Image (cartoon, grey):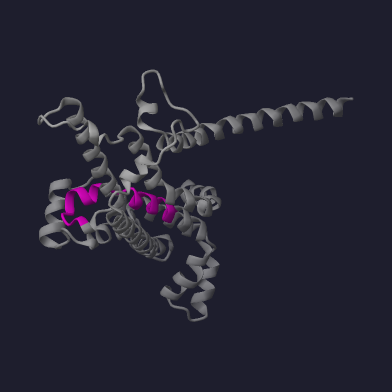
Amino acid sequence: MLNRKMFQKGQRHKLLIHLFFIVACLTFVLPMIMVVSISLSSEDAVTAANAGYSLFPRGFTLDAYKMAFGNSGSIQRAYGVTAAQAILGTLLSCIVAGMVAYPLSRSNFAYRKPITFYIFFTMLFSGGMIPTYIIYTRWYGLGDSFWVYILPNITGGAWNTLVIRTFFKNLPESLFESAKIDGAKELRIFFQIALPLSTPVFATVGFMTLVAKWNDWNTSLIYIYNPELYTLQYLLQKVLNEAQFLRSMTANNMVGIDFSKFKQPTETLRYALCVIAAGPMLLVFPFFQKYFSQGLTVGAVKG
C-alpha cells in the first residue's frame, strides 16, 4: 500500500513537471507562430480597430514578402554578404580564441595570469565609438570594405576566450604530457587533441558568435557606404524605414500628391522581415542545441 501511494505521488509530480515544461514551451512557440501568421495577413486585417493579432492568418496575402523582396537582387546579395561574413568571421574567431585560450589553460605557461587579467580587463573598458572608427578607417583602411566585418572581431572576444580556456583546463593534463613525450609540437597538440575534445564549447561559442554576426546591422550603418556590401539586417531596416516614410506621406499628404494608390504594408512588413532575417538561424539552431548545456556549464563554472 505504501509503495502504491509513493508511486501515485511520483506520477503526480511527473505530471506537474510535464505541464510546466509544456507551458514554458508554448510561451516560446506561440509568439513565433503569431509572427508568421501576422506576416501572412493583410494590412487592413491587422491594423483594423480592435483587430489584434491571431495565430492564423486573416486575409491571407503575400504582399509583405513581395515588398520585402521587391528588389530580389539586393536581397540575395545581402544574404550572400551576411552569410559570408558570419561563417568566415565565426570560424576565424573560434580558431583565434582557441589558440589564445590554449596556452592560458596550461600550467607550465609562465605568463598566463597577467595575460588572463589583461584579457579580462578589456571586458570592463573600451576606447569608445569615435576612436574605434578612426582606427578602423584611417589607420587600418577597413572603411567600406568587406573585411570590416571580419578583422575587428577576429580575436573572438574576451568572454569567449575565457570560457574556452576554462574548458581546456578540465581536459586531463596527462594527454598533453603524453603527446609531448611522443614528440608532438604544441600546434599539433592543439589541433589534434585539444580541438577534437572541445567540440561542445566550440559549438556553443561558435553558434552564439554566428547569431551575433548574423544579426549585426550596426557595422553596415557606421562603416559601409557601398550598397553591395550591406548586410541583410541593415538592408531590411532600410526597406522598413522607406515603407514607414511612404505611409507617413500617404497619411499626411505632405507634397500634395495622392499616395492612396500606392498603399504599402508596414505593420505586416515588420513581421515579414523578422521571418526573413531569423529563418536561417532557426534552422541552424537544432544542430547546436545538444552542445549548449555541456559547453556552457563546463566552460563557465570553474575559474
Q: Position of residue 3 (x, y in %)?
A: 86, 29
- In depth, the one of 100 and 59 nearer the eye is 59
- The location of residue 302, given as percent across then percent down, is 48, 48
Q: Is residue 193 left or right of residue 9?
A: left
Q: Quadrant of residue 68?
A: top left
Q: Residue furthest right?
A: 1
Residue drawn 40% across the image and 43% down it: 275
Q: Is residue 28 left or right of residue 68?
A: right
Residue stretch in magenta? 205-227
| Drawn side of residue 213 relative to residue 3, left or right | left
Q: Is residue 211 magenta?
A: yes
Q: Is residue 56 above or below residue 85?
A: above
Does residue 29 show up?
yes
91 falls in the magenta region: no
Q: Image quadrant for the N terminus?
A: top right
Q: Quadrant of residue 99?
A: bottom left
Predominant SS along the magenta part: helix
Q: Nearer the viewer, residue 87 or 163?
A: 87
| Outermost residue to the bottom | 183
Left or right: where 233 falls relative to 175? left
